[in-house]
Image (cartoon, grey):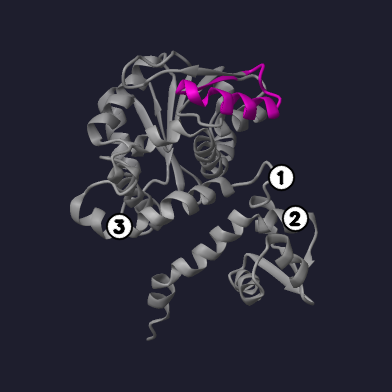
Amino acid sequence: MTPDKIMQLGMGFWGSKCLLSAVELGVFTELAKKPLELEPLRRAFGLHPRSARDFFDALVALGMLERRDGVYSNTAETAMFLDKAKPSYIGGILEMANHRLYPFWDSLTEGLKTGRQQNESKRGGDLFDELYKDPARLKEFCKAMTGISQGPARAIAAKFPWKDYKTFMDVGTAQGALPVTVAREHAHLSGVGLDLPIVEPIFSEYVASAGLGGRLKFATCDFFKADLPQTDVIVMGHILHDWDLAQKKALIAKVYKALPKGGAFIAYEALIDDDRSKNAFGLLMSLNMLIETSGGFDYTGPDCQGWMKEAGFRETRVEHLVGPDSMVVGIK
């Protein structure tokens, strides 16, 4: 018996911050251009000689970089997912984690004792109000949602029977990662990305860059104040966990009302496993909702199935997507 596991977890923030700083600096994007030796790599980011070698070698030891004969390069994973020039870039969520979540999680203990948010609200602000006031921060947030949604979106595009439907809508679409991914794979579909008006330019730019402006449109709706537009399939990704139980049920009821008979609702999250003991990411995400929201929490597949059945959905199922994410599908 050794304390290795305890120490690794307890000091895990060391490695996490090394990765987040590397993403912030653009290390992986620079190395995607060509591998570099230590000195030109150090100069590229203006790092002090005292720190540079340890920093890059720590990234090697953490499995984020490779080093052969003194030359540093990306791993296969960091080349694919952390190069900003690639459409597979997921670093947006890590950028937001670095700038926002990292300092807020310092107050987790306070949140556990009080049950209150530990983000901008402590200064009298609100997460979304703060984001919407700052276009740069809003775009970073939308890119973060793309980063966390790309893997599940690809799985949904492959696993859901889209051939049975013609139209779909992604609620809380942000940049539009899910609509773009699904529309690329299924040419017969037309879709809508639904969000607040200030998000439209970010959505339109992303959709246009994918060449899908003809099949994907933006719509705006305050989903707590108005009915949802009607469509064949409604998707909510990392949306329901933002809200308390009563609000979750109200949103599901609105979805049910907007769907035709046979229409489908897809809710995907980092669902907590039924035993609440294995999907650590889902449980930590629920704690992140404590940090970020006034009443939000994550949930199990059976939890969501129960809410869907209460709203009237005649058939429900849970299906794993990728990593910690799964979807709950309801058929009206």
Give the residue at x 60% y 30%: 182
Q: Is residue 179 above or below residue 76?
A: above
| Element assignment for label 1 | loop
* Residue 279 appears in the figure: no
Give the left or right position of residue 293, taking residue 184 as reference.
Answer: left
Could you give the CA–CA distance between mark 2 and mark 3, rounded to whole angstroms? 36 Å
Q: Is residue 218 above or below residue 98?
A: above
In the image, which residues are magenta? 190-215
| Element assignment for label 2 | helix
- The front one of 137 and 78 is 137
* Residue located beneath label 1 in the image: 85
Answer yes or no: do the residues labelled 1 and 2 have beta carbons within 8 Å? yes
* Residue located beneath label 2 in the image: 32
Q: Which mark is residue 58?
A: none
The disc, 3 or 1, on the residue closer to the chain's N-terminal end is: 1
Residue type for callout 2: Ala
The disc, 1 or 2, on the residue closer to the chain's N-terminal end is: 2
Could you give the CA–CA distance between mark 1 and mark 2, rounded to whole angstroms? 9 Å
Q: Which mark is residue 108?
A: 3
Give the residue at x 80% y 59%: 34
* Residue 108 appears in the figure: yes
| Element assignment for label 3 | helix
Q: Is residue 204 magenta?
A: yes
Could you give the CA–CA distance between mark 3 and mark 1, rounded to whole angstroms? 35 Å
Which image quarter is the C terminus in? Answer: top left
Give the left or right position of residue 21, taking residue 318 as reference.
Answer: right
